[in-house]
């Protein structure tokens, strides 16, 4: 038998001191509506006067209580400062009854708060004055929370701490704050933000998709603005009081940015990709200076319109994404170049030949990937081996006959040339039922090729669907009218926050997540390349925003439309993707 001394409290007041004898297991103490359940392993439940239930753990060595909120019958909660005379320093929640809570106030004894994510009716939060950190995901998805004051004691706001708080308009940050972590305020309604001078870095996506935020001033101590920090926000005006050492790619991507103050021309060139698809970047383009080269000799971007490119001999490095997606038919690389970075020529679909000078020592990952017509590749001889990144030449027409190495040694043939003629499972790309490589002759033993690409007939003219394989499930039926409806067999697919539509090419576009839910597919999203990967059984489909190429396993199909982003939702052309996944797609006008 164990002899226990217990203090029963309600709303932080001492009620009873009692000595109880118990054999084992659960012991219950009650007094005037307040009660505690005790367990041998040390976890206890405390009910406060407002009937809010807490599970708590007493850390005897450190002398504090950790409380976990287990639910309440009331919308307003004030967390007790002590339990059994011991201060409460940590508070979390297990989300029981979370839909009822509208406001919560923490006592100043608390230094750690965690796990109040998705309290959708929580409108008011009073944070304690001695709080040192707001942990990751603490208030993520609290869509009713409209303002927050960060105490002076806080030095760090964790990743996703307030993300998806769509009603959050007013945020007061404190001097002394050292870090705002990844996506901390992404997808919030913030209209104005004053960044404290103590910050030294803005982490990835910290203010991503803040559409109401129109201007921002970067204080003098901030040295780094990481990738996507203000990605697709509403910023129109940017002032930098700092001397930024680094502004990451897509930091201000696709914002309505029109004015930038405090950025030198050298910095503008160095950080060019941070401002992709902004009016300000477009206004900086000068046709007389088509090659943007920084002070270190790195070609950051090509902004010209010529399809025949002669890179100047001042260039030492061809930078990441410098020519991505450009319509170029030829390129001359000078002997001054020593490195071609990742994605440098990614998606240059009209490029047919390239000569790699002996001076080039390294070609990065996917540097020439998806250059679908690139056939003739020549390596000039050098005693130094050429380092090739993975997928450097994938989805090109490179073959043992068209790759001229001049006896130069190079690395990673297997991974650098995957999905080319070097790959035994490669199926050459087709366009309108014909091979892009006109010299290709299908061997007699070749595996059957996919059905020819559907023609450009609009959906409204009901193009005939290809026959479904025998193992295919029910058909996908698309019905026109004022509202587009999509069914899998007889079961209509429900669209919660994004509806299908007919694009300008007459094709039905459907939210990609609906494909996953309705067809039982796995969907992954690569934000860097804006590519969706859709897997169903033994079929994997790759589709990239703005590209008319659909990859099915190792085979390529050219579409007559593209995947799109509308209202922050990714849409894919249903017919092409459905048929690529082995479905039959029917249009019922």
Image: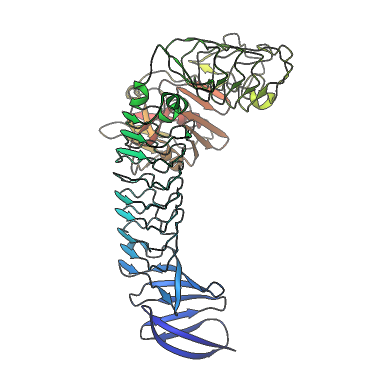
Residue name at image x 44 percent, y 71 percent:
88
Relative depth, front residue between 363 and 96: 363
Q: Is residue 168 visible?
A: no
Work out whether 203 lies above or below 312: below
Residue name at image x 45 percent, y 35 percent:
244
| Number of numbered callouts drawn | 0
Q: Residue furthest left?
A: 482
Q: What sort of colour scheme is used for the picture? A: rainbow
Relative depth, front residue between 521 and 296: 296
Residue 365 picture location, percent across and down: 59, 27
Residue name at image x 42 percent, y 69 percent:
109
Work out whether 153 lies above or below 7: above
Q: Residue 437: which quarter of the image?
A: top right
Q: Is residue 33 visible?
A: yes
| Quadrant in which the C terminus is drawn | top left
Residue 92 picture location, percent across and down: 44, 64
Q: Residue 235: which quarter of the image?
A: top left
Relative depth, front residue between 341 and 354: 341
| Quadrant in which the N terminus is drawn | bottom right
Q: Is 494 on the left or on the right of 406, as rendered?
A: left
Residue 144 picture location, percent across and down: 30, 54
Residue 18 picture location, percent across and down: 47, 90
Q: Is 11 on the left or on the right of 439, as rendered?
A: left
């Amino acid at each position: 038998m164990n002899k226990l001394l217990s203090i029963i409290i309600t709303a932080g007041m001492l009620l009873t001191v009692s000595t109880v004898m118990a054999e084992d297991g659960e012991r219950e103490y009650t007094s005037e509506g307040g009660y505690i359940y005790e367990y041998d392993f040390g976890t206890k439940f405390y009910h406060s006067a407002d009937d809010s239930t807490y599970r708590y753990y007493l850390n005897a060595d450190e002398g504090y209580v950790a409380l976990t909120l287990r639910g309440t019958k009331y919308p307003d909660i004030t967390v007790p400062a002590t339990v059994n005379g011991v201060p409460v320093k940590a508070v979390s929640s297990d989300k029981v009854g979370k839909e009822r809570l509208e406001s919560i106030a923490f006592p100043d004894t608390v230094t750690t708060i965690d796990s109040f994510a998705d309290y959708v009716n929580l409108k008011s939060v009073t944070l304690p004055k001695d709080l040192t950190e707001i942990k990751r995901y603490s208030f993520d998805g609290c869509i009713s929370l409209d303002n927050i004051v960060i105490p002076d004691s806080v030095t760090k706001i964790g990743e996703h701490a307030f993300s998806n708080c769509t009603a959050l308009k007013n945020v007061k940050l404190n001097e002394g704050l050292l870090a705002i972590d990844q996506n901390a305020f992404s997808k919030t309604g913030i209209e104005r933000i004053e960044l404290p001078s103590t910050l030294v870095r803005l982490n990835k996506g910290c203010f991503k998709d803040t559409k109401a935020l129109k201007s921002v001033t970067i204080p003098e101590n901030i040295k780094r603005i990481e990738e996507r920090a203000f990605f697709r926000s509403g910023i129109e005006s940017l002032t930098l009081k700092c001397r930024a050492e680094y502004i990451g790619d897509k930091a201000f991507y696709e914002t309505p940015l029109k004015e930038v103050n405090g950025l030198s021309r050298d910095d503008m060139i160095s950080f060019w990709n941070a401002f992709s698809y902004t009016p300000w970047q477009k206004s900086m383009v000068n046709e007389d200076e088509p090659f943007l080269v920084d002070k270190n000799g790195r070609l950051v971007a090509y902004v010209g319109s010529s399809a025949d490119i002669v890179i100047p001999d001042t260039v030492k490095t061809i930078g990441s994404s410098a020519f991505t997606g450009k319509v170029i038919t030829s390129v001359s690389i000078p002997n001054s170049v020593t490195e071609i970075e990742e994605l440098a020529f990614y998606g240059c679909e009209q490029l047919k030949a390239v000569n790699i000078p002996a001076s080039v020592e390294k070609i990065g990952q996917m540097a020439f990937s998806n250059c679908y017509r690139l056939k003739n590749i020549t390596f000039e001889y050098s005693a130094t081996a050429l380092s090739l990144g993975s997928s450097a030449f994938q989805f090109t027409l490179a073959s043992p006959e068209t790759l001229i190495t001049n006896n130069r040694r190079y690395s990673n043939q297997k991974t650098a040339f995957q999905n080319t003629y070097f790959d035994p499972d490669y199926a050459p790309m087709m366009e309108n039922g014909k091979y892009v490589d006109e010299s290709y002759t299908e061997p007699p033993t070749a595996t059957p090729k996919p059905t020819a690409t559907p023609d450009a007939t609009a959906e409204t003219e009901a193009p005939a669907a290809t026959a479904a394989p025998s193992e295919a499930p029910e058909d996908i039926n698309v019905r026109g009218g004022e509202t587009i409806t999509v069914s899998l067999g007889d079961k209509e697919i429900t669209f919660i926050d994004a509806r299908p539509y007919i694009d300008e090419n007459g094709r039905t576009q459907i939210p990609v997540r609906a494909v996953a839910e309705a067809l039982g597919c796995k969907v992954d999203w690569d934000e860097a390349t804006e590519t969706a990967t859709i897997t169903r059984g033994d079929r994997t489909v790759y589709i990239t925003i703005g590209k008319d190429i659909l990859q099915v396993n190792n085979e390529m199909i050219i579409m007559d439309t593209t995947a799109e982003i509308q209202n922050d939702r990714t849409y894919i052309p249903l017919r092409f993707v459905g048929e690529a996944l082995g479905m039959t797609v029917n249009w019922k006008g």
